[in-house]
Amino acid sequence: MLLVGNGRVITRDAANPYIEDGAVLIEGDSIVAVGPEAELRAQAIGASYVDAHGGVIMPGLVNCHTHIYSGLARGLAIKGCNPTNFLENLEQQWWKIDDNLTLDGTRASAYATILDSLRDGVTTIFDHHASFCEIPGSLFAIKDVAEELGIRSCLCYETSDRRGAEKRDQSIRENAEFAQWAAAQRAEGNHMVAAMFGGHATFTLSDETMDMMAEANNGTTGFHIHVCEGMNDVWDSRQNRGGISPIERLLQHDLLGPDTMLGHCIHVTPAEMDIIKETGTWLVNNPESNMGNAVGCAPVLEFFRRGIPVCMGTDAYTHDMLESLKVFLIIQRHNAAMPNVGWCEDMDMLFKNNPAMATKYFGRQVGTLTPGAAADVIVMDYNPFTPFSDENIDGHMLFGMMGKNCRTTIVNGRVLYKDREFVAFDEEKINAWTMEQSKKLWGTLNGRAY
């Protein structure tokens, strides 16, 4: 058993939201009790102890959209990269990276991304991968790293026509094989790995490819696709795909539904929103990435008004979900020119919808500290200088905390990061190998040694 105590406990359980001097008792991969520490100690005789040092004990965070393939891009300047629009940014930077990402490069990217996620209190990720240099085995390579480092991960591959039929077919096979493997794992009780079926964006997916995706998936899992991130999707559908919208195309090819999650959806019309709502399709918003790519502000407030479920991701712009929480509120209020909107939607995305999506895909209750839930627990260093209670938890989250407040990260009952040090694996060794791979990638991209 493991007792996490000496802290304020935020449970995200409406029936028991906050415990001033609380603790969480873990046995195996599950939470068995949450309550005042004085009461739990009687049940925890012989248990190992994790000291929160007076900080905040809370559920691990979920990132519903990231890109492991960008993990080695930090500090990279590709020669000739000077994009003036979204498509140029893809062509000059991101597609060049994934076109040169080997299986070892994919593994190194996974190490980099997952280590940063765990440091920021993220215990579950939904990744959307691309490595057109070496596609076969890439999702399994990421899975191996995720298992080694201990994070809960839902993976998919970015199917696209952009590099020809052979690469497209490899992408579809990788998705299908991994989804079938993950489904078998789930049937055997593995709640740490899951799969979706990935697609890049509709402007790089032909009608034939969409049909091939649906056929290869055969109902095994849901789809994870970028939609209307830039205007490229809109123009392509209207001009080259029969004059219909991107969402209509997805509907025609049976790619929508309650297990599907669409990324971004910035330039969708009211009619497309109706389709999304009626099919029960989920969306995922990535506020910082949208701002950084200068593609616009997604109409998330309208999505909520229509009852469309929206999750929160980072698109790998950051791995800090609390940073995204802050930025979402700012961009929505700026866009609406109203300083009193977005709060409830912001909190629901990160603390309700993200856990709901994770619970759907992993078959375990994620995102709450309640008996029976998955033992994904983090400790945040936070000493408030204003009153702190169940009445203002979200205000402290929004204005007082960042991912770097994370002191300890526990996933599935396994202590991975304790008192700001990784304890489950050798970080220094991992970082040294990752540096070797990043130098190889950078050298290939820029034609010189690093």
Image (cartoon, helix red, strand yellow):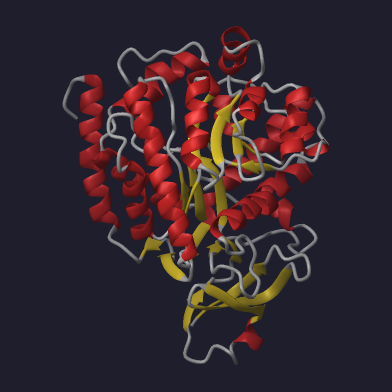
| Residue 47 rendering spot, x and y as whole percentages | 48, 86
User: Looking at this rendering, what residue extends furthest in the left direction?
Assistant: 449
What's the residue at 82%, 29% (across, down)? 338
What's the residue at 47%, 90% (across, down)? 46
What's the residue at 37%, 15% (across, down)? 81
Vertical placement of residue 449 versus 50, above or below: above
Q: Image quadrant for the C terminus?
A: top left
Is 315 on the left or on the right of 422, as rendered?
Answer: right
| Residue 438 rendering spot, x and y as whole percentages | 26, 36
- What is the number of callouts on the image? 0
User: Looking at this rendering, what residue extends furthest in the top direction?
Assistant: 239
Is 437 on the left or on the right of 422, as rendered?
Answer: left
Which image quadrant for residue 91? top left
Residue 91 makes an appearance in the image: yes
Is 135 on the left or on the right of 375, as rendered?
Answer: left
Vertical placement of residue 339 versus 371, above or below: above
| Residue 316 rendering spot, x and y as whole percentages | 48, 37
Q: Between 265 and 12, which is closer to the camera in this rendering?
A: 265
Residue 317 makes an appearance in the image: no
| Residue 195 rendering spot, x and y as whole percentages | 48, 48
Vertical placement of residue 416 versus 114, above or below: below
What's the residue at 26%, 23% (across, down)? 445
Q: Between 336 and 197, which is closer to the camera in this rendering?
A: 197
Q: Between 167 and 86, which is closer to the camera in this rendering?
A: 167
